[in-house]
Every structure is written in structure tokens, then in C-alpha cells.
Image: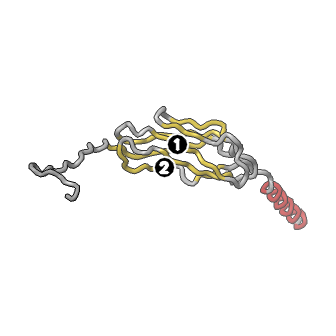
Amino acid sequence: MKKLVFIFLVLSLAAVNVFSQQKKGPIVTFDYLVYDYGTIYQGADGKCEFTFKNTGDEPLILSNVRSSCGCTVPKWPKEPILPGQSSSIQVSYDTKRIGTISKQIYVVSNATEPNLTLSIKGNILQKPNEILPEKKINEGFTPTPNN
């Protein structure tokens, strides 16, 4: 009976070892999933970047990256990202709109978790009016080259 239990235990450990050595596929690991613009003014630079790494053991392919709105435009690498390599998704948000930013970017890939959602958030304030300072003119004063 002890031999039977011992053999079962050895076979179980061997099976666990075999399964743990199997390929796990591409794994996408982002530095962060939410980008916060904070408070910015209308017309400010609306670009941000989501950096990621393929921490798996097979090439990672981003098949589609789309946004929840036309005001948010993502650009992503079309070539495979090899294991251990990093890349990024650039996002451009149109900051002409005033108010709260809350948009999603949907990432579809061949990773073990094939669907991921990235988010951008922030607040856009109306750009303040620019008033140029007026220079006072001395009436009755005629400038000369030495003045």
C-alpha cells in the first residue's frame, strides 16, 4: 500500500512538472492600463502612450486596437512583438472638447488574455482669453536713436 501511494505521488509530481513546462503563449503586460491627463486646457497636446511588453514565450500580435469614440485615435505596432520585447500604443485625443475625458481603447491580440481595455481620463478647461499688455506711450515724446 505504501508503494502504491509513493508511486501515485511521484506520478502526480511528474505530471505537474510536465504541465508547468508547457508553452504559455504570448502574454501582454502593460506598464499601466489608465492614463490620466489631469486638468488641461482646450487645445492642449492630447497625446499619450501605453507601453507594454510581451512577457510570454511566443510572438505577440495586436490584431486590432480601436477606441470608444472618434475623438480618440490609437496607433499600434502591426509587426509581431517577440518574447521579451517591448512596444507601445500611441493614443491621440482631440482636446477641442471641454469637459470630462473618459474614453476606452480596446486591444485585441493573440495573447493568453486576448481582449484588454485601456482607458484615458482627465478634465479639459476652456482656454483662457489671452490679453496682451498695452505699452503706455509718452505723449509729446519723440524717440531719438540715443533714447
Residue 50 % position (x, y): 55, 49
Give the side of residue 82 with respect to residue 97, left or right. right
Q: Left or right: where does residue 27 sit relative to residue 140?
A: right
The secondary structure type at the circle numbered 1 is strand
Q: Nearer the viewer, mark 2 or mark 1?
A: 1
Q: Furthest residue to the top?
A: 70
Query: Within 10 angstroms of label 1, few (less than 14), some, or many (20 or more) residues?
Result: some
139 shown above or below 95: below
Circle 2 crowding by C-alpha within 10 Å: few under 14, some 14–19, many from 20: some
Q: Position of residue 66 (x, y in %)?
A: 56, 35
| Nearer to the camera, 141 or 114 | 141
Q: Which residue is mark 2?
A: 35
Earlier in the chain: of badge 2 and badge 1, it is: 2
For disc 1, the marked residue is 91
Q: Where residue 114 is drawn, which disc sits there?
A: none
Residue 31: quarter of image: bottom right
The quadrant where residue 1 appears: bottom right
Name of the residue lying farthest toward the left: 140
Render colour scheme: secondary structure
Residue type marked 2: Tyr
